[in-house]
């Protein structure tokens, strides 16, 4: 069944516009987070520059739709979610309200396609985020967005961002225009990321195999992250590149829950594809992963992730970008509600991310 992007964008738009209006339900409201002396770093923070959203809508009208009105201002719709145009002054006010000191910025819809437009779009996003980091050096750091359609251009832009602009990592999505990152064409990227030991943040993207009318961020995205990381692991990424630092959004998708089930492919030849090249069960490699806490407001889910990767590999992420969501407060409040000692909480809220980002 082919992926009908026009049907998808009609369904996604209706849900996204609705999502911009209502205030959170009583069940979603949480007490204000406790203000602490230690710093708070939000690793999962999206920024959508208006010029980039316009360009995406112009190049990919079946995937991204740009709108502008007096009530909502400028925004786009992608993957069923409304993406408000980036305003760093507004974001710093939200951070102050929630008690967030530092955000790591990224822009998922940029990887909607793998074509000749990607170098232009990456440079546009990177330059805009770099400017916000220059204006607010103590509030924002950025991840590099790279043109995966051209490895020479990718390595050049990676060097510009990391060496010249002061970016602290690289941002990728589960697939780039339908191409998963375990493909041989992306090998040089992983080689350079391994050489640099630079953090790579993997966020879900629209799945080329999802055809339901239910909104992708709810159902498809956790599966997408799980599939993308499983493919990387089972194709031997960590055996070839042991220094890769991979951070997976949303408590790792469903990896913590499915880790032992995925191991069945290692144990039973009939349950794996010929592309598997692992020397150990996949769950052994998963212990090297880092997970952010975005949208993971469940003790059971949190404990499942902690059991797989350890408290040292959990990182605060809020994914707060929807108007009225208050996901910063909700996520920090959730962590405050857990049975964490002060050292463990501080590791999640700042220490673990600071270590891999080399912030000191």
Image: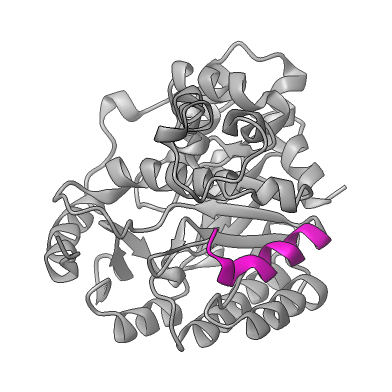
Name the residue furthest top: 339
Q: Residue at x 60, y 18 (%)?
A: 307
Question: In the rendered view, would you say 281 is above or below 6?
Answer: above
Question: In the rendered view, would you say 147 is above or below 205?
Answer: below
Whether the magenta-drawn stretch holds residue 193 is answered as yes
Majority secondary structure of magenta residues: helix
Name the residue furthest right: 360
- According to the image, what is the colour scheme of the structure? one colour
Residue range highlighted in magenta: 182-195
Question: In the rendered view, would you say 158 is above or below 42?
Answer: below
**Location of the N terminus (image quadrant):** bottom left
Question: In the rendered view, would you say 114 is above or below 302?
Answer: below
Q: Residue at x 52, y 26 (%)?
A: 267
Please name whichever residue, 234 or 327, is drawn nearer the observer in this view of the structure: 234
The mark total stands at 0
Q: Quadrant of residue 284?
A: top right
230 lies left or right of 358: left
Q: Where's residue 41, x and y in %?
A: 67, 44
Whether the magenta-drawn stretch holds residue 3 is answered as no
Please name whichever residue, 105 or 69, is drawn nearer the observer in this view of the structure: 105
Please name whichever residue, 62 or 256, is drawn nearer the observer in this view of the structure: 256
Q: Where's residue 20, x and y in %?
A: 26, 54
Q: Residue at x 70, y 46 (%)?
A: 238
Q: Residue at x 43, y 21 (%)?
A: 298
Q: Where's residue 352, x and y in %?
A: 75, 37
Q: Quadrant of residue 253?
A: top left
Q: Quadrant of residue 200?
A: bottom right
Q: Where's residue 191, x and y in %?
A: 74, 64
Please name whichever residue, 142 or 61, is drawn nearer the observer in this view of the structure: 61
């Amino acid at each position: 069944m082919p992926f009908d992007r026009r049907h998808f964008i009609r369904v996604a738009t209706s849900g996204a516009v609705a999502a911009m209006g209502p205030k959170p339900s009583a069940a979603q409201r949480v007490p204000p987070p406790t203000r602490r002396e230690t710093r708070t770093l939000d690793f999962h923070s999206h920024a959508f520059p208006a010029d980039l959203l316009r360009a995406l809508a112009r190049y990919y009208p079946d995937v991204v739709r740009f709108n502008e009105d007096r009530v909502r201002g400028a925004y786009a719709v992608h993957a069923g979610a409304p993406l408000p145009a980036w305003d760093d002054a507004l974001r710093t006010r939200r951070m102050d309200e929630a008690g967030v000191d530092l955000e790591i910025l990224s822009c998922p819809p940029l990887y909607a396609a793998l074509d000749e437009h990607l170098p232009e779009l990456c440079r546009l996003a990177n330059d805009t985020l770099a400017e916000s980091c220059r204006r607010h050096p103590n509030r924002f750091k950025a991840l590099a967005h790279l043109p995966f359609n051209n490895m020479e251009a990718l390595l050049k832009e990676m060097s510009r961002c990391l060496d010249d602009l002061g970016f602290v990592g690289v941002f990728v999505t589960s697939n780039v225009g339908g191409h998963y990152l375990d493909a041989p064409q992306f090998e040089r990227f992983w080689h350079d990321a391994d050489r640099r030991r630079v953090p790579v943040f993997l966020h879900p993207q629209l799945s080329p195999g999802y055809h339901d009318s239910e909104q992708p961020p709810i159902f498809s995205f956790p599966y997408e992250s799980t599939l993308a990381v499983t493919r990387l692991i089972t194709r031997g990424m960590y055996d070839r590149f042991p220094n890769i630092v991979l951070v997976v959004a949303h408590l790792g998708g469903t990896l913590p829950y499915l880790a032992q089930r995925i191991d069945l492919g290692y144990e039973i030849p009939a349950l794996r594809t010929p592309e598997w090249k692992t020397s150990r069960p996949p769950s052994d490699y998963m212990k090297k992963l880092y997970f952010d806490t975005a949208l993971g407001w469940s003790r059971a889910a949190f404990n499942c992730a902690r059991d797989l990767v350890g408290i040292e590999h959990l990182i605060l992420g809020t994914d707060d970008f929807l108007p009225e969501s208050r996901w910063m407060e909700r996520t920090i409040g959730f962590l405050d509600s857990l049975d964490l000692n002060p050292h463990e909480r501080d590791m999640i809220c700042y220490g673990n991310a600071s270590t891999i980002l080399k912030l000191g």
